[in-house]
Amino acid sequence: MPSTASACSASFDWATRKVLSWRVSNTMDTSFCVEALEGALQRYGTPKIFNTDQGSQFTSDELMGVLKDHGVRISMDGRRRCYDNIFVERLWHSVKYECVYLNAFEDGRELRRALLTYFDWYNKERPHKALDRKSPDDVYFPGGQNLLAA
């Protein structure tokens, strides 16, 4: 992984563990979080509820404004409540141990390519115990109805 610090954002469906959109950045600004959210909204539609932690990039006026503009209810984790966002925290743990820590990336482009491959595998093939050993796509698109795969 590049030596600069990285920040991560993912839009994630809790019920199916599907990663709807993701971004990494070497800055802590809000733009990469907004891009991830807008990508998920464009591709998968508007959720009823969006859960986030209290990090400054996730509570920014810009990100909250996108959610409010789409009529999405906001669920925010409480202070010192590390388990409120457990599914996304577990996702990033898996990303680190199944992809990032196993490779020595030369730069951000190489990291991004590896993450594109990882998230494609994660959604389409990685079995999850909580999903009866099915992949997130198997559950999100029952009967193989993935019309967005084209």
Image (cartoon, helix red, strand yellow):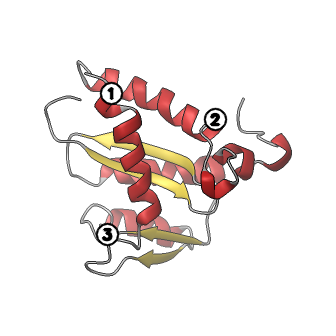
Whole-number angstrom distance, CA of label 1 to CA of label 2: 19 Å
* Residue 79 horizontal side relative to residue 12, left or right: left
* Amino acid residing under circle 2: Glu
Q: In which quarter of the image is the C terminus?
A: top right
Task: Please identify the residue farthest to the top as the structure is shown.
Answer: 106
Residue 31 spot, x, y in % from top left: 32, 50
Residue at (41, 35) in percent of width and height: 98
Residue furthest to the bottom in view is 78
- Amino acid type at circle 3 is Thr
Closest to the observer, 1 or 23 = 1
Task: Give, as a three-letter code, the residue at label 1.
Answer: Leu
Foreground residue, 6 or 73? 6
Query: Please, what secondary structure does the residue beneath circle 2 have?
Result: loop
Which corner quadrant of the image does residue 130 belong to? bottom right
Q: What element carries label 3?
A: loop
Where residue 131 appears, x then y in whole percent?
Answer: 67, 55
SS of the residue under disc 1:
helix
Horizontal side of 86 relative to 134 (left or right) equals left
For disc 3, the marked residue is 59
Residue hosting label 1: 102
Q: Nearer the viewer, residue 87 or 145?
A: 87
Query: Which of the marked residues, 3 or 2, is nearer the chain's N terminus?
Result: 3
Taking the spot 32% from the left edge, 77% from the top edge, the residue there is 81
Q: Tell me which label, 3 or 1, sits earlier in the chain.
A: 3
Do callouts 3 and 2 mark residues in contact (Cβ within 8 Å)?
A: no
Q: Position of residue 115 (x, y in %)?
A: 42, 31
The vertical placement of 75 against 65, above or below, is below
